[in-house]
Image (cartoon, rainbow, N blue to C red):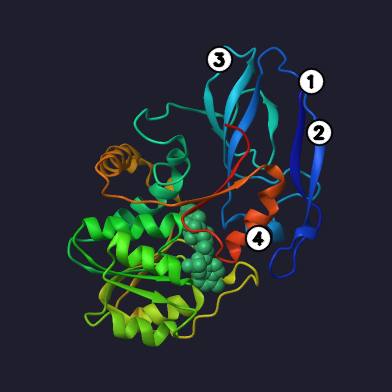
Amino acid sequence: MPKSREIHLVQRPSGAPSPADFALVDRDVADAADGEVLVENLYMSVDPAMRPRLTAGQALNEAMMGGALGRVVQSRHGDFKVGDLVTNRLGFREFFTSDGKGLTKLEPDPDLPLTVHMHVLGMTGFTAYGGLLHIGQLKDGEQVFVSTAAGAVGSVAAQIAKLKGCYVVGSTGADDKARWLKDEVGLDAVINYKKEPIRQALEAATPKGVDVYFDNVGGDHLEAALRRMNTLGRIPVCGFISGYNSGHSVVSNLSNIIYSRVTLRGFVGTDFMHAYPDFQRDMRGWLKAGRIKYQETVRDGIAAAPDALIGLMAGQNTGKMLVKLAG
Ligand SMILES: NC(=O)c1ccc[n+]([C@@H]2O[C@H](COP(=O)([O-])OP(=O)(O)OC[C@H]3O[C@@H](n4cnc5c(N)ncnc54)[C@H](OP(=O)(O)O)[C@@H]3O)[C@@H](O)[C@H]2O)c1
């Protein structure tokens, strides 16, 4: 019977989460019974969407829900064999038994690092791809603004827009991230919103206005973008991280949606699953050709998971935030 550890939410945060909201809990996990597998998680995904769930959705005193990539270490299930890699939503835990429901087998690309399947070649990358091309209806050569442009979703969205020949402005909250976006990724303009007011900086950086704003932030960023939207502009609303700790996001100029005939549409990745095969083909090609760059911030061991989530909300990640549990 393997020993496992998991991260529980023990109290609901008010504002930014803190270490006292979480506990590391020891568990005995049963060996796989007939029709079951025992899975060892290798990597856990740390996502902004976990923060709203701390307020509502995540049960107290249970393992935190969330994406993970694991390996089957015992199998008494006909569809899985020992060594199979499986993605799951069972989150912040080292081991678990499963009857196979909710497990998806992963065939890793031998020419790419395993972890890319958890971000740029996984759902974060697909969110950027579909959000920009299907929800945002991006056309070649348009004027684009992407917020949290150095993050997991934002960095992919910004680079796809560059690949489509667009003029791309990105925002971030740190100088080192801004340098990466300008020097390595090749964005046309980068705003550090912590150093200059987003409204004035975006105005200066977008002399031809904005056709597509890929919104990861809401609040002040959405308000600044609405001032710059060109007629018939599109705003795929991916997230509003600026409001996740407080639970609200204030935008005072929504009337610009009317004046500029803007389409503002929220979405989740599963809205455009028909595009998944195209995404896999395109993204594998771009990655292997070095045309999409990515960064990862990897914390070690399950005990580091609460700090990884707290750090994500405070901008301590560049690119995808992961926790590594086993090799
Ligand atoms: N709709 C969907 O299906 C879907 C799927 C995945 C993610 N999302 C959303 O996409 C967004 C990005 O997610 P991600 O996984 O790629 O995370 P991420 O961008 O890799 O990490 C979060 C980043 O947000 C920035 N941030 C934190 N507080 C902020 C604030 N008040 N104002 C502006 N920026 C702030 C920080 O970067 P800086 O240091 O640059 O400030 C931080 O590093 C989130 O809103 C998330 O909820 C939506």
Dot 1 and dot 3 residues touching (CB under 8 Å): no
* Residues packed near mark 3 inside 10 Å, few (<14), some (14 to 19) or many (20 plus): some
Q: Residue 1 carries which label?
A: 1
Of callouts 3 and 2, which one flags the residue occurring earlier in the amino acid sequence? 2
Q: Name the spot of residue 121 as percent of width and height, x first.
A: 39, 42
Q: In this orientation, does residue 77 appear?
A: yes
| Amino acid type indicated by mark 1 | Met
As helix, strand or loop, the secondary structure at mark 3 comes to loop
Q: In this orientation, does residue 131 appear?
A: no
Question: Taking 134 as reference, is 106 left or right?
Answer: right
Q: Name the spot of residue 67 as percent of width and height, x first.
A: 57, 42
Is residue 254 or residue 23 the one in the foreground? 23
| Amino acid type indicated by mark 3 | Lys
| Amino acid type indicated by mark 2 | Arg
Q: Which mark is residue 81?
A: 3
Is residue 258 or residue 10 the one in the foreground? 10
Q: Nearer the viewer, mark 1 or mark 3?
A: 1
Name the residue carrying label 4: 310
As helix, strand or loop, the secondary structure at mark 4 comes to helix
Of callouts 2 and 4, which one flags the residue occurring earlier in the amino acid sequence? 2
Residue for point 57% across, 11% down = 78
Of callouts 1 and 3, which one flags the residue occurring earlier in the amino acid sequence? 1
- CA distance for labels 1 and 3: 19 Å
Q: Name the spot of residue 297 as percent of width and height, x first.
A: 52, 52
Residue for point 49% across, 81% down = 251
As helix, strand or loop, the secondary structure at mark 1 comes to loop
| Amino acid type indicated by mark 4 | Ile
